[in-house]
Amino acid sequence: MSDNESTAKSSRVSREDAEQRLISSFIDLLGCHPINEITVDLIATTAGLKSGHVLVHRYFESRVGLIAPTAHELSISVVDAMNRGLDEYDNPGAQNCLSLMEQSVEPLRRRAVLVGELMSANADPTLHAADSRNITDVFTRCFETAGLAPRIARAIALKVFVLMSLRSTHHDWMGASDADEADVTQLLMFEVDNAMNVAQQMGWI
């Protein structure tokens, strides 16, 4: 076997490795490029795959096909990070829950951008709806661990998730000032601190 043949064989990557490199590169690019600038060629080049363009179409069929597993990967990372954070707290307070969720802002922002692309492409929402429920579930677990009753914990968890997602995708379109956003954050913290009283007034507990 010639040196060139040996080098070619050693440089080959498995399908699993190639797929993961493409997904990871896509996630990294979402941190520094608008979605409309992230082409298949740029993803492949960033992944270090010379035939990456071909591999995207072979393994994912299209750019949209690559978006779906990338959004799913980001969902998993959020849930895993939240669960790890919860495991580190014996009895997290509600403010600690909000701090944990704040650490999820960036991966949730990138996921929200991808989900927006999938919606525009009329993709099947099934997987991503399940992922959203999983994220809401772990947010709910956090508030329940902090002592909130299940129904109010889930309502607040869903509200936080929706607000974080909207902030990620519609910030520039909302026209809200920094002071507006600070007021929303302060109001949310007040609601969290008074969640049990609110639940009682609404007859949820």
Image: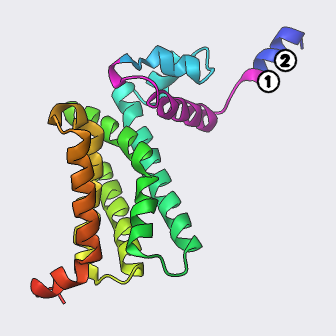
Q: Say whether residue 68 is magenta.
A: no
Residue 149 left/right relative to 5:
left
Between 77 and 60, the one lying in front of the other is 77
Q: Around disc 1, counting alpha carbons within 10 Å, would you say few (fewer than 14), some (14 to 19), or many (20 or more)?
A: few
Between 15 and 96, the one lying in front of the other is 96
- Name the kind of residue labelled 2 in the image: Ser
Location of residue 55 with respect to 131 vertically, above or below: above
In space, the residues marked 1 and 2 are separated at their CA atoms by: 6 Å
Residue drawn at x 57%, y 37% is: 20
Can you say which quadrant of the picture contains the N terminus? top right
Residue drawn at x 32%, y 63% is: 136
**Which span is picked out in magenta?**
10-36
Would residue 76 be visible to someone looking at this image?
A: yes
Q: Around disc 2, counting alpha carbons within 10 Å, would you say few (fewer than 14), some (14 to 19), or many (20 or more)?
A: few
Residue 116 left/right relative to 143:
left
Task: Residue under label 1, please give it.
Answer: 10
Residue drawn at x 63%, y 20% is: 48
Location of residue 66 with respect to 7 vertically, above or below: below
Location of residue 185 with respect to 30 vertically, above or below: below
Would residue 54 be visible to someone looking at this image?
A: no
Res 78 label? none
Give coordinates of residue 2: x percent, y percent: 89, 10
Q: Say whether residue 18 is magenta.
A: yes
Snapshot colouring: rainbow
Give coordinates of residue 58: x percent, y percent: 48, 25
Task: Residue under label 2, please give it.
Answer: 6
